[in-house]
Amino acid sequence: MVITCPKCRHENVAATGQAMEACPQCGVIYARAALAQHQQRQVESVRARVAAAVPDGNAPGFVERFGWYLTIAGALYGSVMLISTWVLAESAPQQAAGAGLAAAAVVVPYCLARALQQLFRK
């Protein structure tokens, strides 16, 4: 009977097929090594199935993307508002009030997007 060692790939032509027979080259017991390799393949296949079944946790969902689109729109609106306030304001208090509103137009959507991101992350 010819048995190939699962560890060192030595072909044992003098193998008898006993349960606790060992490889003459590396000393590994054939039955134990084969069982360990079988269990390792089972573990790897389970890990692969679990990895395929679990969605990518880094991919943003619709609500998260919507929050970030809202942030971009708020940033654009805030920039236009800041520039128009700076150009059209007649006094320093009007410029300060316009700058505050422009900052709020940028900050509020950003905070909302971050809150949605943390809320919908798993």
Image (spheres, grey):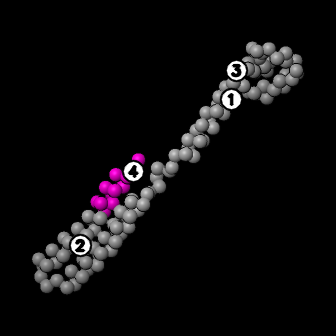
Secondary structure, magenta segment, majority class: helix
Left or right: where 12 falls relative to 96 = right
Q: CA distance from mark 4 to mark 1?
A: 37 Å
In the image, residue 34 above or below residue 98: above
Q: Given this view, does label 1 or label 3 mark the residue nearer the observer?
A: 1
| SS type, badge 1 | helix
N-terminal-most mark, 2 or 3: 3
Left or right of 88: which side holds 52?
right
Q: Amino acid at mark 2?
A: Ala
For residue 96, above or below residue 36: below
Q: Which residues are magenta?
A: 110-122
Name the residue type under label 3: Arg
User: Which residue has dot 3 on it?
Assistant: 32
Sequence-wise first label, 1 or 3? 3
Q: Earlier in the sequence, mark 4 or mark 1?
A: 1
Q: Residue at x 75, y 21 (%)?
A: 30
Closer to viewer: mark 3 or mark 4: 4
> Which is more N-terminal, label 2 or label 4?
2
Q: Amino acid at mark 1?
A: His
Residue drawn where x is 18% and y is 76% of the image: 98
Q: Residue 102: which disc? A: 2
Query: Disc 2 on helix, strand or loop?
Result: helix
Q: Mark 1 packing: few (<14 Cα in 10 Å), some, or many (20+)?
A: few
The residue that mark 4 highlights is 121
Q: Which residue is mark 1?
A: 38
